[in-house]
Amino acid sequence: MQLPPEVPLLAQLPPDWPAPEALGFGQYLGPYLVECQHRAEGGWGAPCLTPRAASPLPVASGATQYGLSVFEGLKAYRDASDGIHLFRAPEHAQRLQRSAERLHLPVPPQALILQLCRLAVQVHADYVPPHGRGSLYLRPTLFAEEECLGLRPAMRHRLSIVVTPCSDPLPKSVRLWAEPELIRAAPGGLGAAKTGANYAAGIGGLLRAKERGYDDVAWLDAATHTQLGEAGTMNLFVQIGDEVFTPPLDGTILAGITRDCVMTLLAERGIACHERVLTLAALTQAGTEGTLGSAFGTGTAARIARITAIGDGQREIHFRETGLIESLHAALKRAQETPGDGGRAWCDTVEPMGA
Ligand SMILES: *Cc1c(COP(=O)(O)O)cnc(C)c1O
């Protein structure tokens, strides 16, 4: 790795660093970026370490002007013996590759993405909270840095990992606003890519939700505004009777890795989970018939969040407590923090710097 001479290999924690429980999410950023440049001629360069505050992104870059930028969000945890591991890193790397393909950005080799992630963790090892009390969230970001005001794929890109240590997410409860007018993604659009443009499309809905006393949006399909898609940063699950349902990956929602974990955990419990279109009308009917159980959202940042209600201004659907969410939250936390838990190969050890 190329290091500027003034950069120490191990980032030092500032003296007045908060306790893990006070970190929250995304508020405290690690001091360094681990990054790699890509040139149309020459391909990927060597990994390098850049002080975060020194990173320039030109106003005329493809990322700033046209949203030519994709990202990932994954976490590093400490195990009970103080070792550090990444959770489901290969799956996150593969999704970054798919997002890059959709936006015609250069697709980084999986080995390069994983190498940069490991380096980012090694450099910020002291920023990884103690076992059970939080994680280091990694945000690999791939963007067009070339300055050009014409629309075309850029000639210069950068893959940069920014990190933020965060608290262990407690099970929280949210109320969702089923947005009747704005849409986040349509068939053929960018909904399945993890890219800023989806958030640009979604922020208005989030504010409309908050104005109405809700915490987040439940996005509906673009054509009929009747089918549940996903929440702002979470995939959705609804329990009806003995079964659990989640919307199918139809290209308008993100293929969440936490979604995949939950489907695995449900299968391990012998609970059937179906990928099926969920309409607000069907949920209302299940409510009337008394079969509607819990609902929850899944994502790397929040883990599993209880959904207490979904409203669209006409009606409000209320979900019940059935114990399912507590059980899944505890199982997922254990899987994330314990390499080899349940015989699953979801954790990859990150060796200490220089080992
Ligand atoms: C990141 C993200 C999710 C959650 O995906 P995970 O892989 O579970 O973290 C869900 N929806 C959107 C729009 C996202 O960007």
Image (cartoon, rainbow, N blue to C red):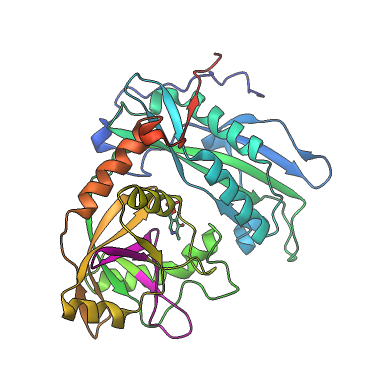
The vertical placement of 251 against 131, above or below, is below
Q: Is residue 314 above or below residue 11?
A: below
Rendered location of residue 164, percent (x, y): 41, 38
In the image, residue 317 lies at what x, y percent? 21, 75
Give x and y (percent) for residue 300.
39, 48
Taking the spot 22% from the left edge, 83% from the top edge, the residue there is 315
Q: Does residue 315 appear to the left or right of 39 in the view shown?
A: left
Residue at image coords 72%, 54%: 147
Q: Quadrant of the C terminus?
A: top right
Please indicate whether residue 31 sits to the left or right of residue 295 in the image. right
Please state which of residues 127 and 17 is positioned toward the viewer in this rendering.
127
Q: Is residue 225 magenta?
A: yes
From this view, report whether residue 148 is shown above or below residue 73. below
Residue 114 relative to residue 26: left or right? right
185 in the magenta segment? no
Looking at the picture, tell me which residue is in the foreground, 160 or 233: 233
Q: Quadrant of the N terminus?
A: top right
Seen as rendered, the residue at the extreme front is 270
Q: Quadrant of residue 214?
A: bottom left
Residue 39 location (% of width, % of height): 77, 44
The answer to whether residue 231 is left or right of residue 107 is left
User: What residue appears at the point 55 percent right and 40 percent down from the top-left corner?
Assistant: 90
Range of magenta residues: 218-245
Answer whether residue 60 is visible to the viewer in this image: no
